[in-house]
Amino acid sequence: FPGAAEWVPDKGGLAKLTAALPECRGCDLYQDAERVVPGEGPARARMMLIGEQPGDVEDKKGHVFVGPAGRVLDKALVEAGIDRSEVFLTNAVKHFRFQREGKRRIHKTPAVGHIVACGPWLQRELAVVKPSLVVILGSVAARAVLGSGFKVTEQRGLPLELPDGRAGVATVHPSSVVRSREYRRDFDLFVNDLRAAVALLD
Ligand code: URA
Ligand code: SF4
């Protein structure tokens, strides 16, 4: 894939970024998705949470974390004392990747090529918002921000330094909590990691 760089504005703020996003042809994912889903939140949020990619519901509505994973994320944010309206929420990949099974569209994890192709949008969001803390939700976001070799399961909830010097914390993706057979335990572990992130905000 050519990557998103040539479509990403190198000046301007979030409005300009969001306006440019639908034009992106940086990889093949724009072809089958309904719409692109931009990051959302205050331009000066101190905390940025990075997910994987829009899901089926997000792709239809055009907003981040408004499906089943979003409901779990919302509950966990409340328990961790984080106000959703004060954080910036985005995804490593801005278009929904899926495969069709009959009428259903089944989530397909983005390939490394998609994560790399979409990286310039995420980097631009980081440069514009300048969060002091980045919360990495799952392995795709970890791949986007920390590169290969990082294991969320081994380092979840621990303070990290990102390659750009920013502080970070990695945890699981909320959709893994949605699917968990030990929901209560995994939900509580997820909340613990979010609390660890809050504790790093100064
Ligand atoms: N999963 C994500 O990673 N992001 C969303 O916006 C929705 C589900
Ligand atoms: Fe562009 Fe990212 Fe969409 Fe690919 S997934 S077309 S790089 S916005």
Image: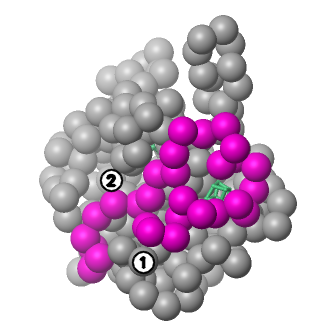
Q: Residue at x 38, y 75 (%)?
A: 14
Query: What's the magenta bit mostly, secondary-structure-wise?
Result: loop
Please give left or right for residue 141 compared with residue 187 in the image.
right
Q: Counting residues from the N terminus, which is met first, the one under dot 2 or under dot 1?
A: 1
Where residue 82 appears, as percent x and y from the top left, is 20, 56
Distance of mark 2 from mark 1, alpha carbons?
Answer: 30 Å
Q: Is residue 75 left or right of residue 57?
A: left
Q: Amino acid at mark 1?
A: Lys
Q: 24 or 52: which is nearer to us?
A: 24
Which mark identifies residue 45? none
Residue corresponding to mark 1: 16
134 lies above or below 189? below
State which quarter of the image contains the N terminus: bottom right
| Residue at x-position 60% and y-position 63% | 23
In the image, which disc is placed on residue 194? 2
In front of the other: 15 or 173? 15
Placement of 49 over or under 68, stated as above or below: below
Q: What element does badge 2 sit on?
A: helix
Tell me the crowding category of disc 2: few under 14, some 14 to 19, or many 20 or more residues within 10 angstroms, Cα based.
many
Please tell me in which quadrant of the rendered image residue 130 appears: bottom left
Q: Nearer the viewer, residue 202 or 11?
A: 11
* Residue located 51% across and 45% down the image: 35
The spot of residue 200 in percent (x, y) is: 31, 72
What's drawn in magenta, residue-wise? 18-46
Magenta stretch holds residue 113: no
Left or right of 137 in this view: 185: left
x and y percentages locating residue 60 in the rendered image: 44, 34
